[in-house]
Structures are given as C-alpha cells and as structure tokens.
Amino acid sequence: MRKAARAAGEKSAALVPVKDIKPLTGYVRGGCSPVGMKKQFPTFIDETAGLFDSIAVSAGERGLQILLAPGDLARYIGARFADLTDN
C-alpha cells in the first residue's frame, strides 16, 4: 500500500470498507471495475502491465472479464502507470 500511496502523492492508502463498496462505486464486492465507475477515481496500473499485449480486468460483474491493451485501459479511465509492487 505504501507504493500506491506514493503514486497518488499521499502519505498512506487504505482499502475501502466492504460495506462502502457498492454505495461508492456502484459495484458489489468482487465485481468492482475501473471501467464504468459511478465516479472517476484516481487509478494506477502497475508499470509491468505494459509488458503485455493485453490484460484482463473486471467487466463489472462477478465472473466477467474483458481483455484490452494496458495503454487503451489507461487512456479510457485516465489511469497512470506506476511502480506498485514489491520485488
């Protein structure tokens, strides 16, 4: 979470409590997707996603995914690539 906070320019980051997921995002737990959120949230994609031709992300419903190029996803949702993982 430290790297995510750093990418966002914040001191810390925390997960959204489960009870707040649907009112905040419009999605049920397990179906959250960066595509089609009720509100635009700052979104970061790990920089290693750029190594792949396509990545899978939630399509907004449990069990459904979409494949798309990382750059296309970033442009569509206004995301930034950042170092988010520990080596």
Image (cartoon, grey):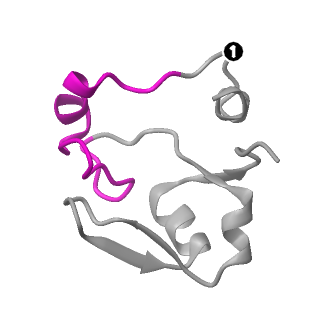
Query: Is 2 placed left or right of 73 in the picture?
Result: right
> What secondary structure is marked by label 1?
loop
- Circle 1 packing at 10 Å, graded few (<14), some (14-19), many (20+), is few
Q: Which residue is mark 1?
A: 11
Tell which of 8 and 84 is nearer to you.
Answer: 84
* Residue appearing at x 71%, y 35% in the figure: 7
Please state which amino acid type lies under the numbered disc 1: Lys
- Name above or below for residue 6 compared with residue 26: above
Task: Residue 19: give x, y in percent of width and height.
Answer: 20, 23
* Residue appearing at x 55%, y 79% in the figure: 69
Task: Residue 21: give x, y in percent of width and height.
Answer: 25, 32
Farthest residue to the top: give it.
11
Task: Residue 45: give x, y in percent of width and height.
Answer: 61, 54
Query: Is 76 placed left or right of 86 in the picture?
Result: left
- The mark total stands at 1
Query: Is 57 placed left or right of 37 in the picture?
Result: right
Farthest residue to the bottom: give it.
53
Tell which of 39 and 62 is nearer to you.
Answer: 62
* Residue appearing at x 26%, y 27% in the figure: 18
Give the quarter of the figure containing the N terminus.
top right
Magenta stretch: dominant SS? loop
Q: Quadrant of residue 9?
A: top right
* Residue appearing at x 28%, y 56% in the figure: 36
- Name above or below for residue 15 compared with residue 79: above
Where are the magenta residues, as a range?
14-38
Q: Quadrant of residue 23?
A: top left
